[in-house]
Image (tube, rainbow, N blue to C red):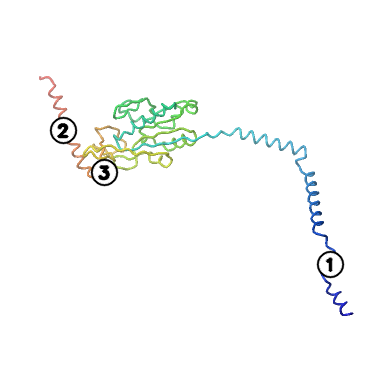
């Protein structure tokens, strides 16, 4: 018996000890009451109940509202960019004019810009090779258009901007991106995508990554009548920018561009023949001495 008593004292059973623990339900109630008490205490200590804190909060809200109202409102919807490219005599200006007139028929306000370098037909109008004509803004660069047009009229009334002979504008990309992305304008760009050496011409190709649509026009080869993709220069000038019409350029297919030397010789022979005939006619018309 003594041994059993000693074992009980040295290694007491856990069952009697568990009787002294509070019941789970009672313990849960104690925790909930404690939590509610702490929440109420925290609420009473909350700085939002302080008059000074309330004034500070209202002041911050007022300042935030004023700052938000001072920010420029974003446009409700962005604009669009449409690019029309192709060789000489492919109808780029005609396509631009038709699209612009179609926009005007829907009630849009339109304006057309061209480079002041192009003086072939009329300085204040764009004229297609077919004879179609429309008033325009001849400009040295696009950055001055907004001021020339009038800032208020540009921002509040102008909807669609057409750009002819776009290869002559060095700031074409920046202008198109700003007009479409930030100002909600529709911009229609028409120009050469390549020069007479089939290299990139100006900034027209730079606009393609930000364009909504790209239209590649073709002409008819003056040698064989097939589809013409390229522009061949008939004269011997080497500068990239050489403004001219049929007397300087001709549309050709790939085959006749590659064999362009023969085409050039033929074209020059035709030009020389025409020049000789013109000279003979002028000489024949002179009165005898």
Of tags 2 and 1, the one toward the viewer is 1
Residue 188 position, x and y percent, is 40, 33
Q: Nearer the viewer, residue 1 or 77?
A: 1
Discs 2, 3 touching: Cβ within 8 Å: no
Q: Which mark is residue 57?
A: none
Residue at the disc numbered 3: 254
Q: Is residue 256 left or right of residue 185?
A: left
Closer to the chain start, of discs 2 and 3, is 3
Residue 116 position, x and y percent, is 36, 29
Residue 127 position, x and y percent, is 32, 27
- In space, the residues marked 2 and 3 are separated at their CA atoms by 26 Å
Residue at the disc numbered 2: 273
Which residue is at 47% across, 28% downward?
154
Of tags 2 and 3, the one toward the viewer is 3
Closer to the chain start, of discs 1 and 3, is 1
Residue at the disc numbered 1: 17
Secondary structure category for the residue under label 1: helix
Q: Above or below — where is 285 with respect to 236? A: above
Secondary structure category for the residue under label 3: helix
Which residue is at 34% across, 28% downward?
126
Secondary structure category for the residue under label 2: helix
């Amino acid at each position: 018996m003594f041994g059993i008593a000693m074992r009980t004292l040295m290694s007491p059973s856990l069952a009697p000890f568990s009787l002294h623990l509070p019941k789970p339900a009672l313990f849960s109630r104690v925790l909930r009451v404690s939590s509610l008490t702490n929440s109420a205490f925290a609420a009473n200590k909350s700085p939002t109940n302080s008059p000074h804190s309330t004034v500070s909060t209202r002041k911050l809200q007022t300042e935030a509202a004023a700052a938000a109202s001072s920010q420029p409102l974003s446009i409700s919807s962005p604009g669009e960019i449409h690019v029309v490219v192709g060789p000489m005599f492919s109808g780029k200006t005609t396509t631009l004019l038709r699209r612009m007139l179609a926009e005007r028929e829907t009630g849009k306000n339109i304006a057309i810009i061209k480079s002041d370098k192009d003086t072939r037909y009329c300085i204040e109008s764009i004229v297609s090779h077919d004879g179609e004509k429309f008033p325009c803004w001849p400009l040295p660069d696009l950055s001055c258009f907004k001021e020339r047009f009038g800032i208020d009229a540009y921002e509040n009334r102008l909807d669609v901007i057409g750009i002819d002979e776009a290869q002559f504008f060095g700031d074409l990309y920046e202008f198109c991106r700003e007009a479409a992305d930030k100002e909600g304008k529709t911009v229609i760009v028409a120009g050469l995508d390549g020069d007479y050496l089939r290299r990139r011409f100006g900034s027209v190709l730079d606009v393609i990554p930000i364009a909504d649509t790209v239209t590649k026009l073709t002409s008819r080869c003056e040698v064989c009548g097939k589809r013409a993709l390229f522009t061949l220069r008939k004269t011997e000038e080497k500068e990239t920018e050489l403004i001219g019409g049929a007397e300087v350029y001709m549309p050709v297919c790939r085959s006749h561009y590659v064999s362009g030397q023969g085409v050039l010789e033929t074209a020059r022979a035709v030009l020389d023949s025409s020049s000789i005939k013109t000279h003979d006619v002028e000489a024949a018309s002179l009165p005898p001495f």
